[in-house]
Image: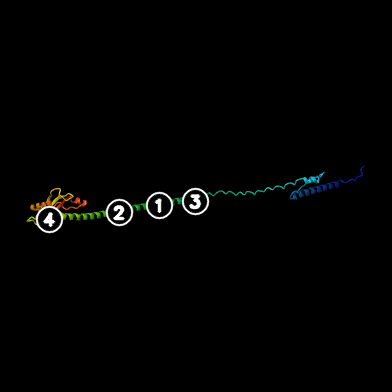
Amino acid sequence: MSTAPAYNEPYRFSAGMLALAMHLAFFAMLYFGVRWQSRPPESFTVEMWDNLPNAEAVSELEPLPPPKMEPIPPPKVVPPVLPPVKADIEVRDKKSKKPDLKDKQSKKDAKKEAKARQEAELRELEAYSERIRKNEQVRVQAEQERVRAEVSAATKVQVERYQDMIRNKIRRKMKMVADVPANAEAIFKITLLPDGMLMENPVLVKSSGFPAYDDAAARAILSAEPLPVPTDESLQKMFRELKLSIRP
């Protein structure tokens, strides 16, 4: 027979409930204690060596190289891509195009002005050249007229001088005719050679009204040859044919 004391059932039930409550409290403390820790504790392993290496073996081991630290590349900063504002771009384009159009128009206007100015200068130069040409033409014509007038005057003087010499020589050869008025005039046409000799007999162009005087004048012309004529060739042709007026 067992000698252990006997316990009543009510005490066993209370003791069991108490033990259960203590276990629940213990598990709650473990649970919340683990949750309250910020990080789990670092674990380490301890390795037990039965036979330690000798000192010579330890000294023969080469030291390990220091770990190579790779530089950490800085993070790439990617700027945010903003969508272009279409309206601003169009405005800028328009503004940038306007000066180009103005410049083109200005250059075009400048070319037109330069061309118009060049044409005006050319017209002015042509007008000036035309005035110079006309003035020169007028001057040349005036000079020619002056020279001709001078030559004509000199020629006229020479012609009149030789004509007077011819008349005087004929008058000296003429026989006086009675009853002839002082205003009587007989005009003859004569043709002379360069030496002053007559090519043919004198031709009566206008009678004095007195036949005797006309005949006396014709005989005097023939008696006066060779008539005095100029030696200048330009004057000799003027004495090729002469009209002589013979007066008493």
Q: Amino acid at mark 1?
A: Ala
Seen at 44% across and 51% down, the residue is 107
Q: Which residue is mark 2?
A: 136
Q: Secondary structure at mark 2?
A: helix
Q: Secondary structure at mark 1?
A: helix
Residue 96, numbered label: 3
Q: Earlier in the sequence, mark 3 or mark 2?
A: 3
Is 141 positioned to the left or the right of 6 in the image? left
Q: Is residue 45 visible?
A: no
Q: Look at the image and tell me in which quarter the C terminus lies.
A: bottom left
Q: Earlier in the sequence, mark 1 or mark 4?
A: 1
Q: Position of residue 211 (x, y in %)?
A: 8, 52
Whole-Å distance between the Cαs marked 4 and 3? 113 Å
Q: Earlier in the sequence, mark 4 or mark 3?
A: 3
**Which label sits in the foreground, 3 or 1?**
1
Whole-Å distance between the Cαs marked 2 and 1? 32 Å
